[in-house]
Image (cartoon, rainbow, N blue to C red):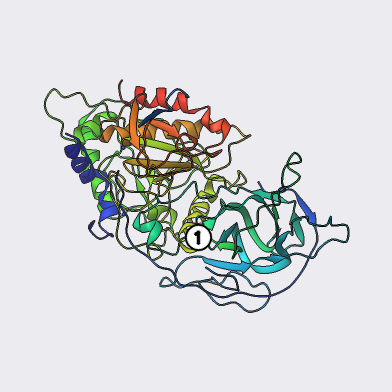
Amino acid sequence: MRALLVTSVGVTCAAALTLPLAAPASSAPVLSSASARPPSLTTEPRTDTTDTIDTTDTIDTSGTTGTSGTTTSDTTAPDGAEPRAAKSAAEPAGSTQSLPLAPLAVPSNRVAGAPVVQGLPQRDARPFSLVGVVWDDAEAELHGTVQVRTRATGTTRWSDWQDVETHNADHAADLGSAEREGRTVRGATAPLWVGDSDGVEVRVRPESPGSQDRAATHVPLPEGMRLELVDPGEDPAPEPARGAPANRAAVPAVFADTPPTAALPEVLTAEIAAASAVNAEVAELGASVIPALTQAETVESVNLAPGAKPYIGPRPRIVTRKGWGADEKLRERNFGYTKSVKAAFVHHSATGNNYTCKQAPSVLRSIYRYHVKSSGWRDFGYNFAVDKCGNIYEGRAGGVTKAVLGAHTLGFNTNTMGIAVLGSYGSTNPPAAAVTAVSKLTAWKLGLFGANPKGKVTLVSGGSNKYRKGVKVKMNVISGHRDGFATECPGARLYKKLGTARTSSAKLQGR
C-alpha cells in the first residue's frame, strides 16, 4: 500500500517538481554608528555527486515530548562597496563573497598565553543579507564564539554584536555517504540573517579552559576559517495570472505576512472534485504554489483499496522551489532517495528572528546558497521549511511526495524528513502558526507513508556524536533534532511544542 500512496499522490502535486528535473538514478538589529571603507573579493568552483546510506544494540529516547586566502563569489568585484547589479535571466541569482579570517590586533592588556582572537576588522563589502563562517575540515569542531556586526546598506549605522550559532556538523549528510565523502564538504556555523548590509566586522574567540583546569590549554580554532557573505538575489517575478474556472477562487498569493487560512471543510462536492484536475494542471505548469487539498480530496487522490482506512491529513499549501526562487543550477543534478519516510525531525534554522514573512524566500535562497556554495552540500539540507507565519516551503529537490534523502540530522537522514522552522527558538517562543504548519505538513507527508505522528519508530544510526553507527534507536515519529544528535536544535522553546504538534498532526490524520 505504501508504494501505491506515494505514486498516486504524485500524480496530483509532484509534477511541478518532477517535470523540470531528471528522473532519479535527489526586525532589524539594534544599531549604533561607525563607518569604514576598505576592499575586495573573487570566486570559487564547486563539486557535486549523489548519496545513499543504510544500515545493528537498542536505545530508547522516546520518553520526551578549502584553504585560506581570498575566494568565493559568483561575480568579480572592484574594491569597495557597489550596488547590487541587475542580472540577466541567464545569470544565477545572488552571490557569495568569501573572506579569509586572520588574527586580530593583540590588545596591550592581553594576558600571556590567552588565545588569539581571529576575525576581520570593519570593512566594506558588496551588498549581502546572510553571514556564516566555514573552515576546511568538516570533521573539525569550532570550540569558541563567533560574533558579527554589520552595517545597513547605504548608511553609516552598525548593528550591535550578534552571536552566530556554532552548531558544528549537526546538520549534515551522513558519514560515509557520497554527499559527505565525494564532495569538498566544509565545517560551518549556522547561517545568520542580518538583512541588507554592505559592511561587516567579525571576531572568533577560542574557548578558554575552565577555571578548574589550570593545566589545560585552549582548543585551537579550525584551519582555513573564512567569512561567507551571501546575497540572496532578487525575488522571482510574479507568475502571470492564469484563467480559473467560473466560481473558483484564484490560486492564493505565494507569500503572506499572516498565517494561511484554515483547511477547507471535509465535504467533497462536485465543484471541489473538479478542483483536483485544476490543481494537477497548475502543478504540471510548474506553478509557484501547490494548492491545498481537503482531506476528502487528498484521500481520493491516493486510490486506496475499498474499505481501507486512510489516516492521511489534508495536503497543505506548499510554496515550491520555483516559488521561493531556487536557482536550480546551483544544486547537484541527480537526486538521492531512501525507501520510506518513517519519521520527521524538526529543526530551527538558527538564522535569527529578524525577518518578515515576505523576506522568507530571500532567507531560503540564502540558506540554500550557504549550504551548497559555502558548506559543499549537494542541495538545500532540509526537505521542508516553515516560516513564522506558517507558510510551508519545499526544500531539497526531488518531489514533495517522495522519500528524498536530506542532509538535516547527521546519522538519521535515511528514511526520515527534516523540517526547518525559520528562526531561533532557544529563548523565543515559536509562533502558533509555525507549530500548526508543522502539524499539517507531518499529518500529510507522514500519512503518505503510513506513519502515526503520535507513534514511536526504531531508526538505525548512521553515526553521530550521540549514537555510534549501527545502533538501533527508538524515537518519536515526530522528533526534535536533539533526539538524534547532541545539539540545542530545535531550540528549547520549539522542542517543548513538539507534543502539541504530534497531537494535532494525528488528529488531522483522523486518529
What is the quadrant of residue 339 in the picture?
Answer: top left
What is the quadrant of residue 267 in the picture?
Answer: top left
Q: Residue at x 70, y 61 (%)?
A: 118
Q: Residue at x 74, y 56 (%)?
A: 115
Relative horizontal placement of residue 320, taking residue 304 as reference (left or right)? right
Residue 148 lies, in percent from the top left, at 69, 55
Residue 404 lies, in percent from the top left, at 31, 48
Q: Amino acid at mark 1?
A: Arg
Residue 492 lies, in percent from the top left, at 57, 32
The residue lying toward the viewer, choosing from 479 and 241, is 479
Relative horizontal placement of residue 291, taking residue 307 as reference (left or right)? right
Residue positioned most to the bottom: 78
Query: What quarter of the picture does the N terminus occupy?
Result: top left
Residue 142 lies, in percent from the top left, at 60, 53
In this rendering, the answer to whether 387 lies above or below 367 is: above
Camera sees residue 278: no
Residue positioned most to the left: 306
The residue lying toward the viewer, choosing from 137 and 418, is 137
Residue positioned most to the top: 511
The residue lying toward the viewer, choosing from 17 and 403, is 403
Query: What quarter of the picture does the C terminus occupy?
Result: top left
The residue lying toward the viewer, choosing from 413 and 8, is 413
Camera sees residue 182: yes
SS label for mark 1: loop
User: Total label count?
Assistant: 1
Which residue carries the number 1 mark? 186
Crowding at dot 1, Cα within 10 Å, few <14 / some 14-19 / many 20+, comes out as: many
Relative horizontal placement of residue 268, taking residue 359 as reference (left or right)? left
In this rendering, the answer to whether 196 lies above or below 78 is: above
